[in-house]
Amino acid sequence: MALWVIIYPHPYQIALTIALLYPLVTLYVFYRYRKRISLEDDDSKIATKQPSLITALTLPAFGLVLRAFIDYDLLVFTDSLLIWGIIVLVLTMAMIWIVSISSYKIGLFSKDSFAVILFVLTYSYGSFIMVNCLYDNSKADIFHTRVLDKHVSSGRHTTYYLTFDTWGQRTAPEDVSVPSSIYGATQAGETIDVYVKKGTLGSQWFFVDK
């Protein structure tokens, strides 16, 4: 699931929708079989004969949040904090409740607890971005801006950037990551369109197109 979402998310909406639902199904399985399944990820599960679901929770959530960072840009990041915080709180309470009634207990400073915290944070943000942007059918406001420069950041992943002049609420030039196809088809000095949408959950986001 993580590789599908990260490397080749096609068909896009179906892949991301499955990735969005998969951790929730995993949580239900953990709740349903809480006496026979654990979140433990070490050799003790061999002795107890309890399979672990920690990988099924964390890896798809990581793929989801990585896809969210790659594909979507919020107009104002702080707009996401309130709803993200609410999702984190609800998911944390659900995890605490399920663990409290299961046969498996998590140590406060164990690696399992850190894995659960990582899952809660990554899945909460990834799911928020996907629900807010992927299913947004609002009409876009279009802004025009000039491309001041372009450059590529190479490392573990190659990222393509265009440097935009001021537009909309942006009062200073900034680098914006774009798909390689748009990067290759755009030269410094050209005008490009920026589309701003309202967001299903009320957090505005934007994308660019020629």
Image: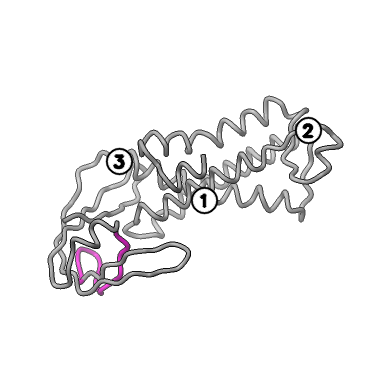
Whether residue 168 is in magenta: the answer is yes
* Labelled disc at residue 136: 3
Q: Give the residue at x 33% y 69%.
A: 152
Instruction: For label 3, count other residues whose C-alpha is less than 10 Å away and answer few (under 14), some (14-19) or many (20+).
Output: some
Q: Which residue is mark 2?
A: 50
Q: Quadrant for residue 98, please give it.
A: top right
Q: Earlier in the sequence, mark 1 or mark 3?
A: 1
* Labelled disc at residue 85: 1
Residue 52, image x, y percentages: 72, 37
Q: Are marks 1 and 3 in contact (CB under 8 Å)?
A: no
Whether residue 193 is in magenta: the answer is no
User: What residue range appears in magenta?
Assistant: 165-178
Q: Earlier in the sequence, mark 3 or mark 2?
A: 2
Residue 143, image x, y percentages: 16, 59
Residue 49, image x, y percentages: 82, 32
Q: Secondary structure at mark 2?
A: loop
Q: Secondary structure at mark 1?
A: helix
Task: From the viewer's side, name the closer residue of 158 and 60.
Answer: 158
The residue type indicated by label 1 comes to Gly
Q: Give the residue at x 35% y 60%.
A: 76
Instruction: Please identify the dominant SS of the magenta region.
Output: loop
Disc 1/disc 2 C-alpha distance (Å):
32 Å
Q: Give the residue at x 78% y 33%.
A: 50
